[in-house]
Amino acid sequence: MRRADIISGMVLIVFGLVMLFIVIPTQIDTAPDGFVSPSLVPNMMMILITFLAGLLIITTIRNKAKETQEDAAPPISKAELVAFLKLGSVFAIALMLYLWVAPLAAGIAIIVGSLVALGERRPFIIIVMPTLILFGIWLLFYKLLGTAIV
């Protein structure tokens, strides 16, 4: 677990720093004088995540426990990497469908694609789950709340 903790901590530190110095400043506008900045809470959360990731690395390094057989194995297995790539491709396809076709097509692609990528093979589940989830979202936003999803 030592290597996995160190790798996780480093990935989270890089994520937090990229969010703090690139994504949040470019994507969130500044507020007028006298108002709380809309980037306050995202900045606070990214600082907390970065701090906790650093703390994870430090405590892992300071803990001089002997490596177990679990530590000798690679921190990310081949099956986990394949699942990560499958789900990443599902989300990439859904993003393209969202931009070029319609949000409904993207929602269907995310649900059905994730189910199939993770091994679901029962047609009833593959058909009923996206139907009920998307119908429930439509019912909530359009009928109960009276708002539109654009």
Image: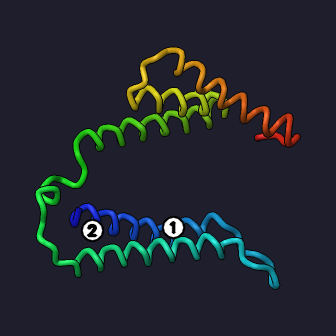
Whichever of labels 2 and 1 marks the residue nearer the N terminus, that label is 2
Q: Amino acid at mark 1?
A: Met
Is residue 121 shown above or below 67? above
| Disc 2 target residue | 6
Rendered location of residue 60, percent (x, y)? 26, 74
In space, the residues marked 2 and 1 are separated at their CA atoms by: 20 Å
Rendered location of residue 43, percent (x, y)? 58, 74
| Disc 1 target residue | 19
Rendered location of residue 49, percent (x, y)? 47, 71
Query: How many residues crowd mark 2 within 10 Å: few (<14), some (14–19), many (20+)?
Result: many
- Residue at 56% from the left image edge and 72% from the top image edge: 45
- Residue at 42% from the left image edge and 75% from the top image edge: 52
In this image, 138 relative to 21: left or right? Answer: right
The dot on residue 43 is: none
Nearest to viewer (mark 2 / mark 1): 2
Rendered location of residue 73, percent (x, y)? 14, 53
Give SS at disc 1: helix
Q: Amino acid at mark 2?
A: Ile
- Residue at 52% from the left image edge and 71% from the top image edge: 46
Query: How many residues crowd mark 1 within 10 Å: few (<14), some (14–19), many (20+)?
Result: some
Is residue 79 shown above or below 20? above
User: Where on the picture, by quarter, is residue 4?
Assistant: bottom left
Give SS at disc 2: helix
In this image, 36 relative to 104: left or right? Answer: right
